[in-house]
Amino acid sequence: MASRRLIPLLDRVLVQRAEALTKTKGGIVLPEKAQSKVLEGTVIAVGPGARNAQTGQHVALGVTVGEKVLLPEYGGTKVDLGDAKEYHLFRESDILAKID
C-alpha cells in the first residue's frame, strides 16, 4: 500500500489522481491528445500538519485520508511508488476544494 511506504511531512498531502476518460458515453475511443487533464483525486496519506510559528505546535490539516479533492491544473510533485498508479504530493494550501 502506498501510504505505508511514503509518509508526507508537515502540511504535505499524497494524492492519487483520478484516471482520465478514454471513451465517451457513446463508445467512441478518445486519443490521448483529446483527453482532458483530470483535476480530481483521492487523498492517500497526510502529514501531521504545519507548525504554528508562535507556539511551535502542529496545526491540523483540513483534509483526511479517503476524501476526494479538487486539484490545480499545474503543480504538485509527481511521486513514483513502483506501481502503475499516478501519485502527487501537494501542500494543503494548493488543494482547491473537497468534493462530496
Image: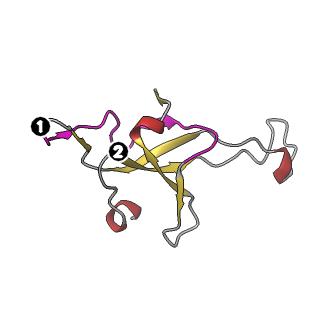
Could you say which disc has been placed on residue 55 in the image?
1
Figure label count: 2
Left or right of residue 87, residue 92 in this image: left
Kind of residue sitting beneath label 2: Val
Q: Identify the secondary structure beneath mark 1.
A: loop
Left or right of residue 34, residue 13 in this image: left
User: Secondary structure of the magenta portion, mostly?
Assistant: loop
Q: Residue 14 in the image: state x and y as whole percent.
A: 42, 52
Could you say which disc has been placed on residue 65 in the image?
2
Q: Quadrant of residue 34?
A: top right
Part of the protein shown in magenta: 56-75
Kind of residue sitting beneath label 1: Thr
Q: Residue 15 in the image: state x and y as whole percent.
A: 47, 49
Could you say which disc has been placed on residue 96 in the image?
none
The residue lying at 84 percent from left, 50 percent from top is 33
Lower position in the chain sequence, tag 1 or tag 2: 1
